[in-house]
Image (cartoon, rainbow, N blue to C red):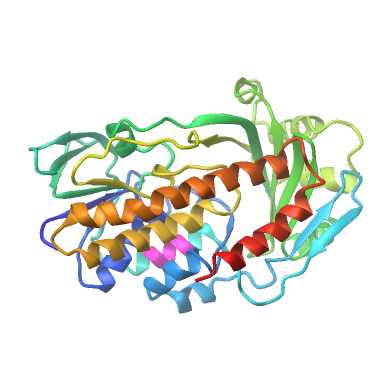
């Protein structure tokens, strides 16, 4: 590969791309807006599927490091009614087909696998300009520094500057938001909640609202309240007043919720954060410009149904493989990658929107178990 490769964004997609290229002796530079690897919290737990995310980590030669951060037992799922009664459960079978890991830990092992200096922290992209007709671009950062690059890859997430440059679609609010909080030292201090959630995930869903809790590493329960609300609702709540905000959020679930379920919310020990859920329109595209490609959420943002992080990892590995297969001809590499990625992400997006609506929408909770069984079948069908 001749010429420079610049990757915008040190999320899972960009880091995987840089790592697989590095394994095969190709250098790249990753530009990240955040000031450091610990610049902000990295979200909760991810289940990494054996048919996409784990394949990518194998290409990264990081499977041992990955297995060392798995939260054993975390694949179990419990479904409860709003009355707190058990509707059904799926045990963790120990097969590690969808093991749970903390996003921050997964990102850490990817960062540590790259040569020092590969990632340029504190480089927020503000503009992209073409240099000539041949696919070269100049990327300018917030500190007025800039870089000229032969190959530009947008791995910069939901609000991608690179997608914007390619006149791609803008994310739309999907009408649902998640409010998150945490319980700590749960085996000692929150035993009822610990028993209720179990070793993995617990979902108690009603049409348009619900509680989703995850047992995470280090004796933590991460709780999300799922609500269908207009975007303006977020501005109407003072989230800095933790106890009042959590009580208000629990109130929005309506009457009839079991006290032990509401405790997951009202006893939260972290200032609640509202996370509106955004998605790209189904079937969206962007202008194909020589020398530029999108991967991960920059290319296909869907609601959180457990697949986004997996396809981000997979995109990174697949694009690296396409570049390796066509050294010196980046347009051939991009075309081969897009030919696979675009139909795959369209199919995954449709499934993502459907499963999100069934889990957290107006069909809940009846479809939950069907969905979980389908997810397992989907994994088996897509197993390479």
Q: Residue 161: x and y, percent?
A: 32, 36
Return the residue nearer the eye: 355 or 152: 355
Q: Is residue 191 above or below residue 136?
A: below
Q: Residue 263: x and y, percent?
A: 82, 45
**Left or right of 122 in this view: 251:** right
Say which residue appears at 33% left-offset and 51% top-offset.
Answer: 338
37 drawn magenta: no
Q: Is residue 77 above or below residue 33?
A: below
**Quadrant position of residue 141:** top left
**Left or right of 357 in this view: 62:** left
Q: Residue 75: x and y, percent?
A: 68, 66
**Left or right of 230 in this view: 205:** right
Q: Is residue 164 above or below residue 344?
A: above
Q: Residue 23: x and y, percent?
A: 28, 73
107 drawn magenta: yes
**Left or right of 166 in this view: 375:** right
Return the residue nearer the eye: 231 or 283: 283
Q: Is residue 320 above or below residue 10?
A: below
Q: Residue furthest bottom?
A: 64
Secondary structure character of the magenta stretch overall: helix
Rendered-image quadrant of the N terminus:
bottom left
Q: Specify whether residue 146 is in view.
A: yes
Tally of numbered tags: 0
Say which residue appears at 66% left-offset and 46% top-offset.
Answer: 355
Q: Which range is magenta?
A: 106-110
Q: Specify whether residue 270 is in view.
A: no
Say which residue appears at 32% left-offset and 55% top-offset.
Answer: 337
Say which residue appears at 25% left-offset and 65% top-offset.
Answer: 116
């Amino acid at each position: 590969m001749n010429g420079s490769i610049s990757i915008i964004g040190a999320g899972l997609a960009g880091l995987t791309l840089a790592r697989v290229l590095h394994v095969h002796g190709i250098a790249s530079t990753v530009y990240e807006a955040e000031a450091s690897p610990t610049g902000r919290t990295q979200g909760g737990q991810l289940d990494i599927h054996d048919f996409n995310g784990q394949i990518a980590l194998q290409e990264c030669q990081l499977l041992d490091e990955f297995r060392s951060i798995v939260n054993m037992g975390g694949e179990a799922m419990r479904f409860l009614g709003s009355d707190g009664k058990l509707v059904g459960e799926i045990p963790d079978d120990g097969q590690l087909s969808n093991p749970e890991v903390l996003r921050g830990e997964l990102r850490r092992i990817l960062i540590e696998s790259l040569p020092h200096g590969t990632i340029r922290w504190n480089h927020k992209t503000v503009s992209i300009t073409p240099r000539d007709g041949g696919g070269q671009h100049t990327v300018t950062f917030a500190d007025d520094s800039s870089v000229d690059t032969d190959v530009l890859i947008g791995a910069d997430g939901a609000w991608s500057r690179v997608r914007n440059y390619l006149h791609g679609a803008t994310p739309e609010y999907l009408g649902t938001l998640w409010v998150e909080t945490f319980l700590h030292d749960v085996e000692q201090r929150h035993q009822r909640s610990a028993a209720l959630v179990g070793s993995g995930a617990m979902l108690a869903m009603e049409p348009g609202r619900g509680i989703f809790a995850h047992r995470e590493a280090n004796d933590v329960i991460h709780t999300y309240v799922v609500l269908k609300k207009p975007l303006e609702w977020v501005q109407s709540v003072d989230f800095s007043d933790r106890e009042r905000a959590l009580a208000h959020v629990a109130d929005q679930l309506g009457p009839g919720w079991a006290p032990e379920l509401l405790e997951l919310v009202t006893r939260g020990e972290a200032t609640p954060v509202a996370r509106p859920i955004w998605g790209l329109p189904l079937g969206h595209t962007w202008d194909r410009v020589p020398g530029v490609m999108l991967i991960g959420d920059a290319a296909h943002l869907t609601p959180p149904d457990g697949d986004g992080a997996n396809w981000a990892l997979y995109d990174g590995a697949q694009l690296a493989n396409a570049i390796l297969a066509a050294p010196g001809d980046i347009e051939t590499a991009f075309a081969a990658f897009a030919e696979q990625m675009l139909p795959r992400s369209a199919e995954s997006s449709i499934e993502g929107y459907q499963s999100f609506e069934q889990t957290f929408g107006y069909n809940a909770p009846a479809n939950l178990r069907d969905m979980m069984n389908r997810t397992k079948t989907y994994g088996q069908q897509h197993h390479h």
